[in-house]
Image (cartoon, rainbow, N blue to C red):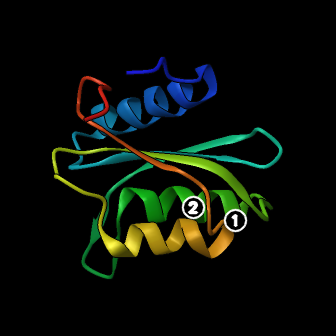
Amino acid sequence: MAELDPEDSKIITLARSARARTGAAEGAAVRDTMGRTYSACTVSLPSLKLTALQAAVAAAVASGADGLEAAAVVTDADSVDAESLAAVHDLAPTAPVLRANAKGELP
């Protein structure tokens, strides 16, 4: 397996940290086209439900990002759900979405 780009490693680390900090099911991070990063975890409130990746994309958009370079999700799931992918692809149709386990390892 090829070595991961340092900037992609960074967003995986941020996603792992977001997940660990809250004990959430998922953590995610995105990098915008200016190189800024945003991380988030799953939001599960009675009135608001967001996947970690949706929350990270929302944080980026709320901060003025108009595009994304890459995204990462740390999850135990076998795949990234369609709603999460759609949030990323709304801003960047070809941005890679990395999926890692709790140790930060890609499958």
Q: Quadrant of residue 57?
A: bottom right
Looking at the rendered image, the quarter that the C terminus falls into is: top left
Q: Position of residue 54 (x, y in %)?
A: 46, 65
Residue drawn at (32%, 26%), measured in percent from left and top?
104
Q: Position of residue 12 (x, y in %)?
A: 45, 32
- In the picture, measured across the screen, residue 37 lies left or right of residue 16, that is right
Q: Nearest the camera: 91 or 60?
A: 91
Q: Secondary structure at mark 1?
A: helix
Q: Residues within 10 Å of mark 2 (few under 14, many from 20)?
A: many
Q: Position of residue 71 (x, y in %)?
A: 53, 48
- In the picture, measured across the screen, residue 44 lies left or right of residue 13, that is left
Report the number of discs: 2
Q: Is residue 75 above or below residue 17?
A: below
Give the label on residue 61, or none. 1
Which amino acid, mark 1?
Val
Task: Look at the numbered discs 1 and 2 and tell me whether their residues touch, using CB distance below 8 Å.
Answer: yes
Residue drawn at (77%, 59%), measured in percent from left and top?
65
Name the outermost residue toward the front.
1
Residue drawn at (24%, 34%), measured in percent from left and top?
101
Q: Quadrant of residue 50?
A: bottom left
The residue carrying mark 2 is 57
Residue drawn at (63%, 27%), measured in percent from left and top?
7
Q: Quadrant of residue 74?
A: top left
Q: Residues within 10 Å of mark 1 (few under 14, many from 20)?
A: some
Q: Nearest the camera: 85 or 41?
A: 85
Name the outermost residue toward the bottom.
47
